[in-house]
Amino acid sequence: MKRLFVTGAAGFIGSNLVRHLLADDRDVSITILDKLTYAGRRETMRDFLDDPRVRFVEGDICDASLVEELVQGADAIVNVAAESHVDRSILGPAAFVQTNIVGTFVLLEAARKAGVGRFLQVSTDEVYGSIASGTTDESFPLDPRNPYAATKAGAELLARSYFTTYKLPVVITRGANNYGPFQFIEKAIPLFTTNAIDRQPLPVYGDGRQERHWMHVLDHCAGIDLVLREGIAGEIYNIGTDDHRPNMYVVEQILAALDRPRDLIRHVSDRPGHDIRYSLDSSKVRALGWEPTRSFESGLEATVRWYEENEWWWRPIKSGEYARYYEQNYAWRATAGSR
Ligand code: NAD
Ligand code: TYD
């Protein structure tokens, strides 16, 4: 697969995926479509925008005529673009329905009409909902519990239906929580890290005993690439590590790495419907040959250093739209308290 069409590459996972693909294959050519929402930034792509193998188009995955034009001649589509933050989906779900469901539909239709040979839908472990104990394999029932997760579940069900009905060669990945360079600072790890750098409070939802299993973004990208090349059409692949960590542990590691005091921690009102725990059984993708290569502790340490050394990237985000979002999402929480 030489001619790839990748959506959402001005964001966190998409930009890391493009870096991974360019490093992996000298002959690849990649067309990127990204709307440059608040989460998508040219700066994030600055190291590959001038690469002759890359063509960047600013635009919306919901724009059917643009998408139809761009997918002509593509060997594969990788749909990474999404509205991706749970808290924003609680504040305003409309954009999530539009981009995550309608946008995926537009891409699937264009792929079907153009006869594209592969369609990879990047999905998430959040489609399974909260798992009190044990692990979820790919046959586990879906139980998304917030608008973000519900729209991601809707998108992948639609994608699967295009395999069953139209024989479009769809593969789906369900990734665990990612961390690493270029993650937008609304997400927990970069939010805690940049707040700690600035000696600002770290807002922990509820008691902080919720658990995520964390995966370095480059391990995720290697898994997506493997499924793109070797996954069986119509199949779903979980991609996750065994690195389960409670949120309080994550916060404490970040504070220790930055030599900041524990009294920066603030327990604030919990997220409504907060999923307590996710846990993927990833034996299927491991059977294809995938293994995570970074431990959480070493990956987190490197990520904290990256944010320390790359203020040029995140410092400008802290004002403007992000400041308004922060006020909307956190001001009431801090005063309401939680315990
Ligand atoms: P992100 O918010 O950092 O990036 C999303 C990108 O999509 C941005 O560049 C944005 O501009 C673009 N975009 C949004 N709406 C668009 C539209 N209508 N048209 C074109 N471009 C649009 O998100 P991320 O964390 O990189 O997540 C990427 C994908 O991976 C999402 O599908 C998400 O569901 C999935 N995922 C994320 C995680 C995680 O931990 N971050 C884990 C598993 C799966
Ligand atoms: P997040 O990065 O938003 O990912 P997701 O909700 O998709 O798993 O959050 C990771 C965990 O951190 C989750 O349990 C919610 C928690 N969290 C906080 O405690 N405080 C915060 O300010 C944020 C953004 C998240």
Image (cartoon, rainbow, N blue to C red):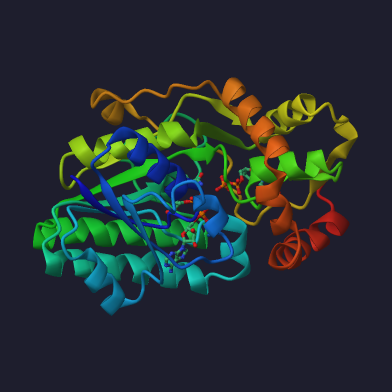
Above or below, 289 against 337 in this view is above
Quadrant in the picture for residue 266: top right
Please name whichever residue, 282 or 326, is drawn nearer the observer in this view of the structure.
326
Above or below, 66 against 293 in this view is below
Q: Residue at x 53, y 58 (%)?
A: 42
Q: Position of residue 4 (x, y in %)?
A: 25, 52
Q: Position of residue 33 (x, y in %)?
A: 37, 63
Judge from the rendering whether residue 82 lies leftward or rightward of residue 79; answer left or right: right
Please name whichever residue, 144 or 163, is drawn nearer the observer in this view of the structure.
163
Q: How many marks?
A: 0
Q: Residue at x 27, y 50 (%)?
A: 29
Judge from the rendering whether residue 12 lies leftward or rightward of residue 91; answer left or right: left
Judge from the rendering whether residue 197 lies leftward or rightward of residue 302; answer left or right: right
Residue 241 visible at all: yes
Q: Residue at x 19, y 60 (%)?
A: 161
Quadrant in the picture for residue 89: bottom right
Quadrant in the picture for residue 296: top right
Q: Residue at x 34, y 46 (%)?
A: 141
Please name whichever residue, 10 or 106, is drawn nearer the observer in this view of the structure.
10
Please name whichever residue, 250 or 335, is drawn nearer the observer in this view of the structure.
250
Above or below, 112 against 246 in this view is below
Residue 138 visible at all: no
Q: Report the quarter where the N terminus lies.
A: top left
